[in-house]
Image (cartoon, rainbow, N blue to C red):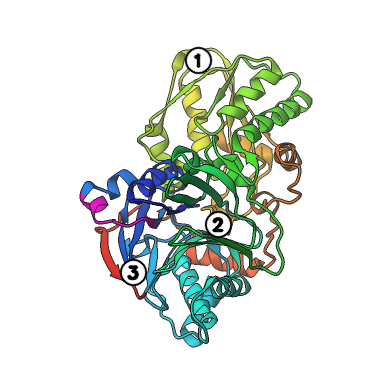
Amino acid sequence: MCGIMGVVARGPVNQLLYDGLQVLQHRGQDAAGIVTAEGGRFHMHKGSGLVRDVFRTRNMRNLPGDWGIAHCRYPTAGSAYNSAEAQPFYVNSPFGLTLAHNGNLTNAAQLKREMFRQDLRHINTDSDSEVLLNVLAHELQDAVTHCDLDEAGIFRAVAGVHRRCRGAYAVVAMIAGYGLLAFRDPYGIRPLIIGRNLTPDGPEYLVASESVAVDTLDFQVLRDVSPGEAVLIDTEGRFHSQQCAERTVLSPCMFEFVYLARPDSLMDGISVYEVRLKMGEYLAEKIRHTHPRLDVDAVIPIPDSSRPSAMQLAICLNLPYREGFVKNRYIGRTFIMPGQGVRRKSVRQKLNAISQEFRGKNVLLVDDSIVRGTTSREIVQMAREAGARKVYFASAAPPVRFPNVYGIDMPTRSELIASDRSDDQIRAEIGADELIYQDLESLQKALQAVNPSISTFEASCFDGRYITGDVTADYLDNVERQRGGAAKSGDEFEGQLDLNLVAQD
């Protein structure tokens, strides 16, 4: 999971990109980067940490230009990272290209071998995003070998990317002297939305992971990028688009709506907030049927993403809704923090219980999901220490039993509490008196109730079905071997990159 955006504006774009990254910060907290273009020159600054820590006034002054792309990152490969893997990435041939990517390529290792043996390109990092950039560069080189660069050649190159790349990818890229390119994988697993702002000097365009970036920058939502589609906005502000994949099916990631996206976002015609309300309704219905005698004094959400579900559940069951935990917003989200030890320690730093809401009560805690179980176990213990008589736990999502290989950091079975345990074993593991999970069928109904036109969703972490069709048992075993069962290192980048790159016209 990462946040990406690209803007073609009628004036300086650096502040727009910075502000957009701020509202996409929830999608990645490990690194951030911005590239702007001024004529044929790219200007780049990227580094480790939160957006506000990476960019200072001096850095912003060194990012002139009226179009650019930006990225906020968290790693998905499971290994320690360094500054070289911060995005966007850059190659100087052909034309000069820079790219930011959200997702994960499942055939990155194969592509890397092809780059070396066939395409004669060197990949300098372990990032699949650099692989993707070089595939695009190679396909662009092939597409324009016998003609000048134009939109038809660019779209042929994207079609080549689709033929070669597997997995999930939403991409924004810049072609020096030509324009902003954005495209989405043929399944539309990762979100990508287009905004437009009409000015007296002409239209401005913005492409971003979530509509919240469009809204807060005073652009109007135009539409989502379709699966397999490429969008090209040239430096004059002309908008071009074309379907570049042979076969497409819209199958957005379910977990985006459960946890990753902000509730005020709209993705693929689905309001995240409205879906989470529906999730609460369906979860209440299940509790009514499977636990009719559950004695609950208060429904308490685990801040923040479970609030809509918990609130709606309380309304449907006619139970008091209470805020029982105060969240320290200056601590990173534990799900995307590297290393189990860091996650466990950070839970107590991030949440603090309001003891009067627990003392002597039977409480129903509602969380958006249970992934590793570390946070859930600590929260149940906190509730008991605050005086709760009984602690029931409800998950607005089904059990996460399978690795996710499409860009969310839950790639090994050994790290998932539900991978080899029954619901009752999980209940005992987290220390709850009762445990209620959402049904997968109900989660899909909640999504389709908001947008009935979407018939399939990417739900591999719940059902083990990998929609791209190329994820085998051997592939998953190899991922686990690479991770070695070890927690990710939390080392910081050693320094930051501050580059001015001269691109070819």
Upstream in sequence: badge 3 or badge 1: 3
Q: Could you classify mark 2 by the number of other residues whose Cα lies within 10 Å: few (under 14), some (14-19), or many (20 or more)?
A: many
Q: Which mark is residue 40?
A: 3
The front one of 216 and 358 is 216
Q: Which mark is residue 357?
A: 1
Q: Could you classify mark 3 by the number of other residues whose Cα lies within 10 Å: few (under 14), some (14-19), or many (20 or more)?
A: some
User: In the shown orientation, is residue 214 left or right of residue 152?
Assistant: left
Q: Which mark is residue 320?
A: none
Q: Is residue 392 visible?
A: no
Pointer 2 residue = 411
The residue stretch that appears in magenta: 58-67
The amino acid pointed to by label 1 is Glu
Residue that appears at 46% across and 65% down:
129
Q: Position of residue 119 (x, y in %)?
A: 49, 84
Which quadrant would the C terminus be assigned to in this image?
bottom left
The amino acid pointed to by label 2 is Pro
User: In the shown orientation, is residue 227 left or right of residue 20?
Assistant: right
Residue that appears at 54% across and 56% down:
407
Q: Secondary structure at mark 3?
A: loop
Number of numbered discs on residues:
3
Q: Is residue 346 part of the magenta span, yes or no? A: no
Q: Position of residue 458 (x, y in %)?
A: 67, 53
Q: Residue furthest left?
A: 58
The front one of 235 and 308 is 235
